[in-house]
Structure formats: structure tokens, C-alpha cells
Image: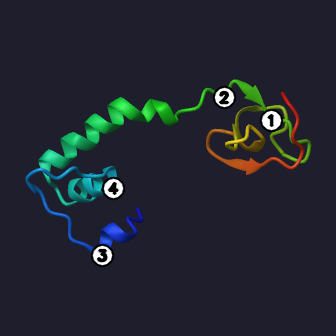
Amino acid sequence: MNTSTYSQQEVRHPERGRRYSIVELRSLADGGDAWAISRVDDWEMNFSDEYAGSLAERCTDPACDGHGEPVDLCCDEAGNLRDADHGGWGHELRHAEAA
């Protein structure tokens, strides 16, 4: 796991009054900090399903090997189709049309 700027700074616990990012918590958990392990577990239980897709749509890209398979279509801020997430892999949509 790449922790970018956090890997250059040693993260310590406890630091009174400090709010830890999930990246910092994972770094501490990887080091065996029991408190951080429980915080990472709490975070995953509360927020992991927000990032899980339903695969309720169909791939609309005729150039895709998985054309017609269940996907989650991802859009940009303006609502334009951006890519298709097949669950374990994904790709940009070159042929964008509603499913």
C-alpha cells in the first residue's frame, strides 16, 4: 500500500487531540497498534459498503470483451459517462450510451 507523504513521517499513537486519517490508521495497524487495528475495523464496517457497487447496469462498450455483462457505470461531476466497473476490473467508455 502506498501511503505517499505519510510514509516519510513516522506516525505515532497516541497523540492527544489528533485526528488520524485512514491511511495513518492503516500504517499504525500494520505496525501492530491494537487501537489502530480496531479503528480500521470500525472504519471498514461503517464505510466499506459505500464503495461497493451493485453491478446493476450493463456494459455498453461494443469493443469490450465483457459487452453486455453487469457493470457499474461511473460518471464525472457533470454526469457524463466515464468508465465501466466490471467488479474486478474496469475500462474507460469509448462508446457512451445509456444502458
Sequence-earlier tag: 1 or 3 = 3
Residue lying furthest bottom: 8
Of 18 and 97, nearer the camera is: 18
- Residue type at mark 2? Leu
Q: CA distance from mark 3 to mark 2?
A: 38 Å
Q: Which residue is mark 1?
A: 59
Give the numbered dot on residue 55: 2
Against 25, residue 51 (above or below) is above
Q: Secondary structure at mark 3?
A: helix
Classify residue 28 as left or right of residue 93: left
Q: How many marks on residues? A: 4
Figure quadrant of residue 98: top right
Give the numbered dot on residue 23: 4
Q: Which residue is mark 3?
A: 8
- Name the mark nearer the viewer: 3 or 2: 3
Give the numbered dot on residue 91: none
Residue lying furthest front: 78
